[in-house]
Image (cartoon, grey):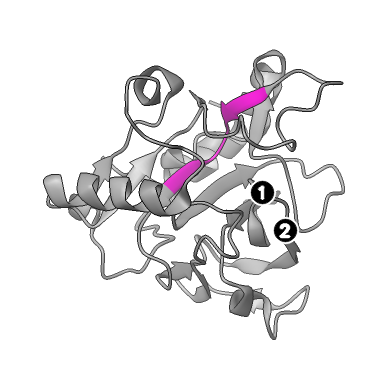
Amino acid sequence: MTSLENILQSQSNVKVIDGNNDYQDYVAFDLSAQRTNQLDLNLTDAHQFEEFVEKHLADNKAKVAFGGYLEERNLYKRSENFNNTDTAERNIHIGLDLWIKAGTSVLSALDGKIHSFQNNEAVGDYGPTIILEHTVEDLTFYTLYGHLSLESLAGKAEGDAVNKGQKIAELGDAAVNGDYAPHLHFQIIQDLHDKKGDYPGVCSQQEMEYYHQNCPDPNILLKIK
C-alpha cells in the first residue's frame, strides 16, 4: 500500500452519508457497461434511473446502494464532457457512488477544512461540488463530494474548518446534480494539480493506472462490506 492508503486504512468509523444509515443497510450496485448493456433501461432518463435505484434498494431491503470504483460504464456516453473527439473516451469511474434520495445529509469524512467549491453545471458533470483538505500524519490529501444541492454551497468559505462527521451538504436532485438519479460521488485525491472546485471523476482506459494511484479506492477509508 502507498502511504496514503495506509493512513486511510488506519481510520475507523468513517461515514459520508447520513450517520443514521448503518453499513449493514448498504447494498452493492453494479453499473458496469457489461451489466447495463443487458438492461432495458434508458440511462439518459434520470427519473427512470431513479426508479431503477429505488427498486434495487427495495428488492434488497437496503437504504443505500454503493459501488463503482474503477467501473467501466456507459452512463457517460451522452455527455460531451466524456466524449470529446480530440481525446480518448472517458468511461472509467474513479470514485465511489452512494445512491440514496435527494436531501440526504452529506458528512465530512475526516477533520479538515474547505479547500474549494463550485457548481459544475454541464450535463453529466458533478453539479454543486465541495472539496475538503485533510492532513493526517503530515500527509495532505483531499476528499471530493459531488452531485450536491445548490443550497449546499451557500455560506461556505475556503478555509472553513470542518470536523469528522459534520454535515457539510445535502444531495441534489436531477435538476441540479448533472442530470443523474440522486447520489453522492465520493472521491479521494492525493494531488489536485492546482484544481479548485472540480477534479476528474471519470478517466480513459489509457489514464487508469495514473488515476488508480492518485485516487485510491474510497472504500479503503469507508470500509463498507
Residue pictured at 54% horizontal, 35% vertical: 5
**47 is within the stretch colored magenta:** no
- The residue singled out by tag 2 in the image is 121
Q: Nearer the viewer, residue 124 or 216?
A: 124
Q: Amino acid at mark 2?
A: Glu
Q: Are marks 2 and 1 in contact (CB under 8 Å)?
A: yes
User: Which structural element holds mark 2?
Assistant: loop
How far from the left and from the top, in percent, is residue 73? 51, 26
| Residues packed near mark 1 inside 10 Å, few (<14), some (14 to 19) or many (20 plus) | many
Q: Amino acid at mark 1?
A: Asp
Real-space Cα separation, disc 2 to disc 1, in angstroms: 6 Å
Residue pictured at 48% horizontal, 75% vertical: 166
Q: In the displayed image of the protein, which residue is found farthest to the bottom?
A: 155
Q: Nearer the viewer, residue 101 or 40?
A: 40
Q: Which mark is residue 125?
A: 1
How far from the left and from the top, in percent, is residue 121? 72, 58
**Res. 59 in view:** yes
How far from the left and from the top, in percent, is residue 169? 54, 73
Q: Is residue 139 left or right of residue 70?
A: right
Q: Nearer the viewer, residue 135 or 65?
A: 65
Residue 158 sits in quarter: bottom right
Chain part drawn in magenta: 90-97
Residue pictured at 24% horizontal, 43% vertical: 27
